[in-house]
Amino acid sequence: MSTVTIHPAIENLDTGSLCYSIYIQLYHNFFNAQDQQYVKEGDETSVRLRNTAYNFADAIAGGVAGEGSGNSGSSILLEYLKKSGGDMSGMLRANYGFEAGIGNTPVIRTFVKDGAVYGVGFTGDVEIGGNNLVIGGSRFISYDRESQVACINNPCINFLDSKLLLAGELIIGEDKTKGIYLSPAALQINGKDVYHAGNANLATVDWSMGNGYIGKNLSVAGKAVLSGMLEACYGASLGYNGNILVSVEQEQVGFSSFLSFASGFGIKMKGIPVLIRVNENDIQLGGLGGDIILGNDSTNRIKLYAGLSDIDGEHILLSRYGAAYFPNSLTVRHNYGDTLLSSYKVDKDDEGMVIHKNLRFTDSRGAFFTGDPDGIAFSSALVRYVGEDTQRQVFTHKTIFLHNPSVSRYASMDRLSNSFFIRTDADFFSVNKPLEAQGHIGINNAFTRLTDGGLFFNSEKYLLSATDGIKHYGNAYFMDNLSSGFFSSGFAGSGWAVIRNKTTGNTAATFDELTIRKKMRIYELEVQKISATNGSLWISDSCSGDTVEKI
């Protein structure tokens, strides 16, 4: 089985590329050079020939045109232009001579003269924009043939550290009378001489003048003394030791230092002190008859680094960490609405908080407590879905807790008795835990009550717990059957029962034994079996006995 596989890059070759052209030509030449008896297309030898042809083509194409996979080596031909021309992507070097032209005619060449002088020679015309010299895409020098004037047109000419030597004159402007004129002997502006250190004031001479105007900067090395008002309506900078401490700019005054006030002094507005150093330690911040506003729309938060106290300094009303204390009163509203919470005091034994409206839990839609004229009301909403279309209905129920005069039958007779009431507009009360009470559980305005070991209906009818059962006081009425826990009828049955036949209306009783101490009256007697031992059996139409004596 052959282990030679065709190179995977051959299938991805572009048929229009140089690499493919060289590859297919080499393969055909290699294949045709073989003995056709031993080489067939697609066999192991042909695959080897294809791989060999591809490797050669990849190296040649990569060196000539930059094609190929790049695995053939350094591809040194990539650094040279093709004979037919092309674009260069690197730097052009011709350090041992250079010649260029057009139409097989040299135009520019490099040369060396006497082995020491190197230069560039032009054998054709050199065009530098006609009458212009263009540098950096902009016209730098232009020449007018008629006026024989060369003009330099550039936004800025910087001579750096070079010296500018001018033997003639320099005119800036139209002419001497309408511009600046400079010559080795004079300096004039608009035809008037300019005075300078050489022909005017000296360092040892004082100047005295009337009004003066300085168009740019004024530097004073010594002390400047002003006997009148200083006016600087376009800004000012004040400082010390070369550092600016106060700067006046457009619509603002900036300070890079502290403001220090002696006791009793500070800042006034409209003649009213708004910031005063009261004494050595205290600072007072005030207004102009209005409010003091802390923060603005751009303020994220206001931080307290000390507690906020009352005017006497005895109580901290708001601490730096949020503890609040309101010794006088507290009133809470929401969005300028009605009062929701307030504090009150009648005396030391009657003081507290007043909830004026709802006291909700969890969120603004949760259950809530409200004040009621009789007590405290608890309200909550219940959502139910009814009908085939599952229509959504919301039920809101209220339960009131209050104290009222007692209506219990067991209320104390020697004093006024009161009770705690729970009223609700719901249908039932339901608890999910056992309900326990001390004393008894009763029915409102009734004698019925449940106690530990007894159920009382009144003073004559009640049930009491006994050691082995229940004591029943009062008549007992059973509307249906009465039986043991397990009962089956018949001779071999078990248990006992008193059962009413719903078909005939008769009531039948079944017991294992029946003992009657006195008289038994039977309107009809049906006996399955009668056995008599050690005695006689009497059968009579009528027989009765008042006493029985054993003989």
Image (tube, rainbow, N blue to C red):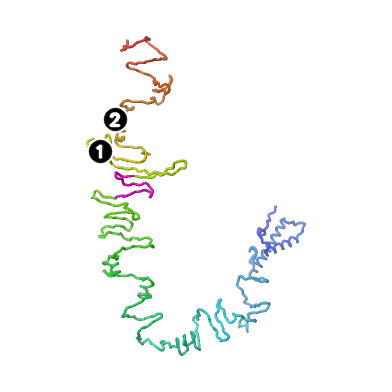
Q: Specify start and end residues of the magenta stretch as a single range.
A: 354-377
Q: Which of the two residues, 416 or 87, is positioned nearer the viewer here?
A: 416
**What is the x, y in percent for residue 85?**
66, 71
Residue 70 in the image: state x and y as whole percent: 63, 64
Q: Nearer the viewer, residue 318 or 407?
A: 407
Residue 144 percent location from the top left of the image: 57, 84
Residue 461 drawn above or below residue 82: above
> Mark 2 packing: few (<14 Cα in 10 Å), some, or many (20+)?
few
- Residue pictured at 65% horizontal, 63% vertical: 68
Residue assigned mark 2: 458
Which of the two labelled residues, at mark 1 and mark 2, occupies the earlier sequence position? 1
| Coordinates of residue 344 in the picture (x, y in percent) | 27, 51
Q: Is residue 365 magenta?
A: yes
Name the residue at the left extreme: 414
Above or below: residue 362 compared with residue 261: above
Which circle marks residue 417 in the picture?
A: 1
Amino acid type of the residue tagged 2 in the rendering: Asn
Q: Residues within 10 Å of mark 1 (few under 14, many from 20)?
A: some
The answer to whether residue 527 is above or below residue 194 is: above
522 in magenta? no
Q: Residue at x 38, y 72 (%)?
A: 249
Which amino acid lies under the numbered mark 1 shown in the image of this protein? Ser
Query: Which SS class for mark 1?
Result: loop
Vertical comparison of 511 with 166: above or below: above
Residue 32 picture quarter: bottom right
| Residue 129 visible | yes
* Foreground pick, 449 / 380: 380
Left or right: 141 in relation to 511: right
**Residue located farthest toward the bottom when viewing the structure as drawn:** 185
Q: Is residue 267 visible?
A: no
